[in-house]
Image (cartoon, rainbow, N blue to C red):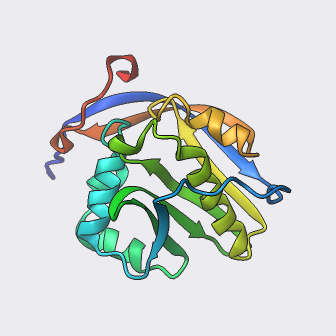
Amino acid sequence: MALSLVEPAIRVAVDVTFLRMVVPPPEPGAPLPEGWRIERVARCSVPFYRFLYNTVGQDYVWWLRRAAGDSELAAVLSDPGVSVHVLYQGGEPAGFFELERRVGGTTNLAYFGLMPHAVGRGVGRAFLRAAIDEAWAGGCDLLTVNTCTADHARALPNYLAAGFTRLRTVREIWPVPVRLGLKVPERLLA
């Protein structure tokens, strides 16, 4: 008889909203504030990616990539359809976005966010617009993104204001491994 070990997990209940943009925004977006810049990481290492992902997502229950092993994450990062773009302020990382270009012309804004020290500094909308522009510049026919009730409260309103339209919202229960040590807000416990 085989013994099945189940990893201890916290059950997290979130409403996930799926959004899409079918044409690029017609008007140019506001530029990043002075002193801020975005750089595409040519070959993102697993440790640097983990730093970005963990720092941006620490307050929003970003867990999937935390739970992935190094080899799995390295495979994602070496995929030619995946690109990582880092926001810098004064030479210091302040956020990142990840684009996933899929066969058939769809690009997914897989991850987008600011580091805690950059939230509330007036750069979020311009940074989001830069991510959108980068997606469309790469031969995109459809841009998708999703957000959930674990994300920052302004995430969904900002996506809608940027020109995304809501497709659907679904309830998901996530088994977040206890070993990750993430703080889960009481309101999200299933």
Q: Quadrant of the C terminus?
A: top left
**In the rendering, at what x and y percent does residue 73 appear?**
33, 68
Q: Residue at x 56, y 37 (%)?
A: 155
Answer above or below: position of 96 versus 61. Answer: below
Q: Is residue 183 left or right of residue 104?
A: left
> Residue 187, image x and y in percent?
39, 17
154, 110: nearer the viewer: 154
Residue reaching furthest to the top: 187
- Comparing 84 with 28, the one in front is 28
Is 46 in front, or is 70? 46
**Residue at 37 percent of width and 29 percent of height:** 12
Total marks placed: 0
Q: Residue furthest front?
A: 34
Q: Position of residue 11 (x, y in %)?
A: 33, 29
**Which residue is found at the position 33% from the left and 42% from the top?**
117
- Residue pictured at 61% horizontal, 45% vertical: 125
Q: In the drawing, does residue 55 fall left or right of residue 87?
A: left
Q: Where residue 95 appears, x then y in whole percent? A: 41, 54
Along the line of sight, which residue is nearer the eye, 69 or 40? Answer: 40
Task: Name which quarter of the figure residue 91 lies in.
Answer: bottom left
Name above or below for residue 85 compared with residue 11. below
